[in-house]
Amino acid sequence: MIKVCIVEDNNTVRQGFETLLTRTPGFQCACSCSTVGEALKKIPKLSPDVVLMDIQLPDATGVECTAKLKELLPKVHIVIVTVYEDSERIFQALQAGACGYLLKRSGPEKILSAIQEAHEGGVPMTPEIARKVIGQFRQQATVRSEVEDLTEREREVLVLVMHGHANKAIAERLGVTIAAVKWHLQHIYEKLHVHSRTEAALKFKQGTSSEN
């Protein structure tokens, strides 16, 4: 028997999940919550196997709720079920500790199979979401490769750019000429495939954060 908790503020959707779980052998609806506050109060006491989590909730986000529940119940499997399919929300949820991400338009069979898969240690995702995740990892790999191609001096220049220093200040700090700083920046732009200091700083931050 897989014990499942639901966190969903839409009454129709929540009741639909409850009915689905109640009528399907092998599944148990342990509790159903409409807010993050209610979820954090009830779910830790029940120690469910799987939690179905909405993202947009009245008092906080499902991402925040996921992170807090994972702190309290490290072994719980949380599957996001939402209408949102943008890459940023997907990765926020996965980074918070969710093991799966489904769209609400997924049918009952897909929901049940996702719960089963999560319970068995899998990573349930709808095809659209899986493609976005793969695409994002490929993009991160490309950015990391570009950043790794930077020289030590180019990295030093970019760190100072990130801290808001102008070319003159960078030159003084590094003990080089302003022309040398401009030369380094030109090479940085070429290697990172960007056209401005801001773009270069953002890409450098993205690439170095993925190194950690």
Image (cartoon, grey):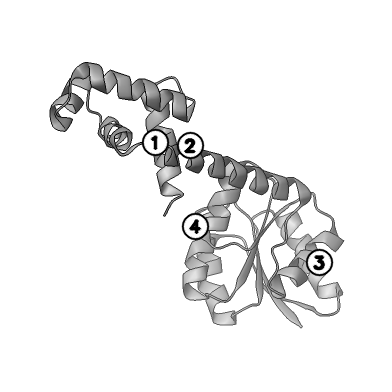
Q: What is the spatial separation of the Cα atoms under label 1 and label 2, in whole angstroms?
A: 7 Å
The amino acid on which the numbered mark 2 sits, given as a three-letter code, is: Glu
Q: Are marks 1 and 4 in contact (CB under 8 Å)?
A: no
Q: How far apart are marks 3 and 1 (CA)?
A: 46 Å
- For the residues labelled 4 and 2, the Cα–Cα distance comes to 32 Å
- Please name whichever residue, 194 or 2, is drawn nearer the observer in this view of the structure: 194
27 relative to 202, above or below: below
The mark closer to the camera, 1 or 4, is 1
**Which residue appears farthest toward the bottom when viewing the image?**
1
For label 3, the crowd category at 10 Å Cα-Cα, with few meaning under 14, some 14 to 19 and many 20 or more, is few
For marks 2 and 3, give the one nearer the viewer.
Answer: 2
Tag 4 residue: 64
N-terminal of the pair, mark 2 or mark 3, is 3
Asked if labels 3 and 2 touch by Cβ distance under 8 angstroms, the answer is no
Residue identified by numbered label 1: 150
Q: Which of marks 3 and 1 is nearer the N terminus?
A: 3
- Which of the pair 54/94 is nearer the observer? 94
Q: Quote the CA–CA distance across marks 4 and 3.
A: 25 Å
Choose the circle earlier in sequence order: 1 or 4.
Answer: 4
Please tell me whether mark 1 sits on a helix, a strand or a loop: loop
Q: Quadrant location of the C terminus? A: bottom left
Left or right: where 146 falls relative to 25: left
Residue at 53 percent across and 77 percent down: it is 44
Residue tagged 2: 146
Specify whether 92 is left or right of 185.
Answer: right
Name the one closer to the observer, 105 or 202: 202
- Residue 113 — which label? 3
Discs 1, 2 touching: Cβ within 8 Å: yes
Amino acid on which disc 3 is placed:
Ser
